[in-house]
Image: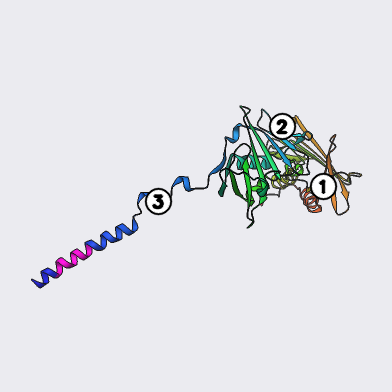
């Protein structure tokens, strides 16, 4: 009988232990985090519906970005310029799904304390239906790592991560297209390169490249194309272009696109300009060294082993 009683007691102990374990590890529904406790979103937009972005910063001219019917972004203010598509797309993506870290006030009465009475950045976003939202970015929070933000017409004040502000805080030069060639990933048909006294005229037939009637190694040609494609300005300058030492002409799109680039030495760097365009681009000496090495490396394919 004693053994039987011990067995029953052990079973009861096990049952009670299971109940306690279950109750400790199962949170009641009312204790679970609520969706409403999450930091509220500041903006939720359809990125494809955004057509205009107007950027105003203290002590700077406003910059206006407009999306063409083709889907390509252009700088339309303060003057018409080509835009860096990747930079603009990054801004649009950030704005279309902009989250806060937390809400500071739901009905702010003193915007001056947050730097929002005269915000450092104003971003006006216009959609296809002409609906406009204006994002105001104010001061850094005391602990840094975040900034105060709000939407015009909405009394709520939020904090937003500083790195998000960085992705939106772009100057005119940040937004300008710095690429020297527009042929992108299209395969050129002709490359004409004048490098001092050296001149190379490369033409493509099908998949093969030729120089003076001699077939060239495809790998060395692709390296040259890559260096031309990747040529990008370090910054824009107002002067420094003198007598060009390098001229590159790239023909693509079935002969419809002909791009001509002139490059001159300027101190330790180079200054380049596209033919018939006033913009001057400063290039690093390393970029030009890499281009010249790629041009010198163009060669005929190795003879097959017998």
Residue assigned mark 2: 253
Q: Residue drawn 75% across and 30% down?
A: 255
* Position in image of residue 232 (x %, y %): 76, 45
Q: Element type at marker 3?
A: loop
Residue 216 or 238: which is nearer the viewer? 238
* Position in image of residue 194 (x %, y %): 85, 43
As drawn, 27 above or below 248: below
Q: Residue drawn 35% across and 52% down?
A: 28
Q: How crowded is mark 3: few (under 14 residues within 10 Å), some or many (20 or more)?
A: few
> Which disc, if any, is residue 118?
none
Residue assigned mark 1: 282
| Mark 2 or 1: the one toward you | 1
Q: Can residue 12 be found in the magenta stretch?
A: yes
Q: Can residue 248 be found in the magenta stretch?
A: no
Q: Is residue 166 visible?
A: no
Question: Farthest right residue?
Answer: 243
Give the residues drawn in magenta, as a range: 6-14
Residue 245 or 93: which is nearer the viewer? 93
**Tag 3–tag 1 contact (CB < 8 Å):** no
Q: Is residue 17 visible?
A: yes
Q: Element type at marker 1?
A: strand
Residue 216 or 267: which is nearer the viewer? 267
Q: Element type at marker 2?
A: helix
Residue 150 as seen in the image, left or right of residue 75? left
Count every numbered label the image shows and give the total: 3
Q: In which quarter of the image is residue 254?
A: top right
> Which disc, if any, is residue 32?
3
Q: Which comes before the other along the chain, label 2 or label 3?
A: 3
Q: Which colour scheme is used?
A: rainbow
| Mark 2 or 3: the one toward you | 3
């Amino acid at each position: 009988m004693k053994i039987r009683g011990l067995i029953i007691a052990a079973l009861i102990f096990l049952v009670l232990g299971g109940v306690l374990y279950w109750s400790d590890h199962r949170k009641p529904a009312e204790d679970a985090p609520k969706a409403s406790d999450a930091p509220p979103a500041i903006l939720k937009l359809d990125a494809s519906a955004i057509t205009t972005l107007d950027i105003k910063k203290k002590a700077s001219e406003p910059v206006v970005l407009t999306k063409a019917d083709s889907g390509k972004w252009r700088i339309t203010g303060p003057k018409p310029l080509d835009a860096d598509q990747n930079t603009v797309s990054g801004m649009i993506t950030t704005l279309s799904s902009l989250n806060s870290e937390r809400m500071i006030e739901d009905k702010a009465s003193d915007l001056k304390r947050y730097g929002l009475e005269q915000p450092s950045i104003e971003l006006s976003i216009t959609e296809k239906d002409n609906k406009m939202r204006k994002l105001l970015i104010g001061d850094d929070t005391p602990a840094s790592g975040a900034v105060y933000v709000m939407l015009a017409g909405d009394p709520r004040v939020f904090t937003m991560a500083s790195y998000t502000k960085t992705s939106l805080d772009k100057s005119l030069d940040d937004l300008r297209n710095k690429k020297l060639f527009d042929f992108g990933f299209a395969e050129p048909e002709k490359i004409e390169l004048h490098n001092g006294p050296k001149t190379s005229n490369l033409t493509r037939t099908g998949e093969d490249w030729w120089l003076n009637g001699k077939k060239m190694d495809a790998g060395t040609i692709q390296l040259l194309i890559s260096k031309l494609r990747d040529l990008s300005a370090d910054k824009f300058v107002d002067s420094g272009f003198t007598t060009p030492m390098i001229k590159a002409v790239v023909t693509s799109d079935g002969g419809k696109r002909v791009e001509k680039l002139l490059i001159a030495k300027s101190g330790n760097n180079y200054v380049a300009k596209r033919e018939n365009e006033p913009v001057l681009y400063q290039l690093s000496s390393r970029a030009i060294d890499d281009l010249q090495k790629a041009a010198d490396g163009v060669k005929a394919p190795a003879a097959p082993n017998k």
